[in-house]
């Protein structure tokens, strides 16, 4: 159990366009979902935390208007990178925490974003 | 953000050897987690530790939650080529609205056949 999926797995876009990444918990209801960004050879850095039906909480230094997060249901959260620029190119990973599971996060497979 | 001190940064070992890596923190954590990440993939949970002093095994992996709650180690016995990857420790404090994983910087493991 505890499977989290992400779509797409990789995306290449032009500078200035917006990109939406979906994160789904497949076999459990996720009360909380998290979005991380990982640059090459670095650790995961938390961008924001979202609870179903409420506004996301962003970490310091993360622009909420640039990284739009929607957690409309207990199984789906989306991250939209608006007006993407080359410096936004990164590996974006979501994770989910379910209320009925042990106190751990289960991660999705990640989305590789390349902005040209 | 805050990060844990994870060591070593990288290890090169021969197949069959045992491996040990650890994490330390200046802060107390209620939960310690160990993840493995393969290239281009998300982290996969290996072991979760919930009590100070707890020693938990998962196959060839053994991890312990330090008594002080400020450290944890992961051992891999009889390594095999598929153990290659980046191993991350993560500390967690959860309570009320405060729920946040703090990650170590990772240990890159290379296993030579």
Image (cartoon, coloured by chain):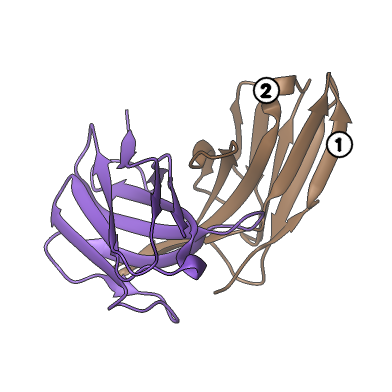
Residue pointed to by mark 2: B82
Are labels 2 and 1 on one chain? yes
Q: Is residue A14 above or below residue B57?
A: below
Give the chain ID for the purple colour. A
For label 1, the crowd category at 10 Å Cα-Cα, with few meaning under 14, some 14 to 19 and many 20 or more, is few
Which quadrant of the structure image shows residue A19?
bottom left
The earlier-in-sequence mark between 2 and 1 is 1
User: Looking at the image, how many numbered discs can be counted on the residues?
Assistant: 2
Residue drawn at x 74%, y 21% as measured from the top left = B81
- Identified at 37% across, 59% down, the residue is A35
Q: Residues within 10 Å of mark 2 (few under 14, many from 20)?
A: few
Residue at image position (73%, 35%) is B75
Which chain, by letter, is brown? B
| Residue A13: numbered disc | none
In the image, A55 versus A91, the foreground residue is: A91
Residue B16 vertical position relative to residue A116 in the rendered view, above or below: above
Give the quarter of the figure containing the N terminus of chain A: top left
Tell me where residue A103 appears, x and y as whole percent.
Answer: 37, 48
What chain does mark 2 sit on?
B
Query: x and y percent of residue A75 in the render?
Result: 18, 44
Per the image, the residue denoted by label 1 is B12
| Quadrant assignment, res A18 | bottom left
Q: Is residue B4 above or below residue A11?
A: below
Left or right: residue A82 versus residue B71 is: left
> Marks 2 and 1, Cα distance to the nearest angstrom?
13 Å
Residue B85 locus on image (x, y percent): 67, 36
Identify the chain of the residue marked 1, using the numbered disc in the image.
Answer: B
């Amino acid at each position: 159990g505890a499977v989290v999926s992400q779509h797409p797995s990789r995306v290449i876009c032009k500078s200035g366009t917006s990109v939406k990444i979906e994160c789904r918990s497949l076999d459990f209801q996720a009360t909380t979902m998290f979005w991380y960004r990982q640059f090459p050879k670095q650790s995961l850095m938390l961008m924001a935390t979202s609870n179903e039906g409420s506004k996301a909480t962003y970490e310091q230094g993360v622009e909420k208007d640039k990284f739009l997060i929607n957690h409309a249901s207990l199984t789906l959260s989306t991250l939209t990178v608006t007006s993407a620029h080359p410096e936004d190119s990164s590996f974006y990973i979501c994770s989910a925490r379910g209320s009925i599971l042990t106190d751990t996060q289960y991660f999705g497979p990640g989305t590789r974003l390349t902005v040209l | 953000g805050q990060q844990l001190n994870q060591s070593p940064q990288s290890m090169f070992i021969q197949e069959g050897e045992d491996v040990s890596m650890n994490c330390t923190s200046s802060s107390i954590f209620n939960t310690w987690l160990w993840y493995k990440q393969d290239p281009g993939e998300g982290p996969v949970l290996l072991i979760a530790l919930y009590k100070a002093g707890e020693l938990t095994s998962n196959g060839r992996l053994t991890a312990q939650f330090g008594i002080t709650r400020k450290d944890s180690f992961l051992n891999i016995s009889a390594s095999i080529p598929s153990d290659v990857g980046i191993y991350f420790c993560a500390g967690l404090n959860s309570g009320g609205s405060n729920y946040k994983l703090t990650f170590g910087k990772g240990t890159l493991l290379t296993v030579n056949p």
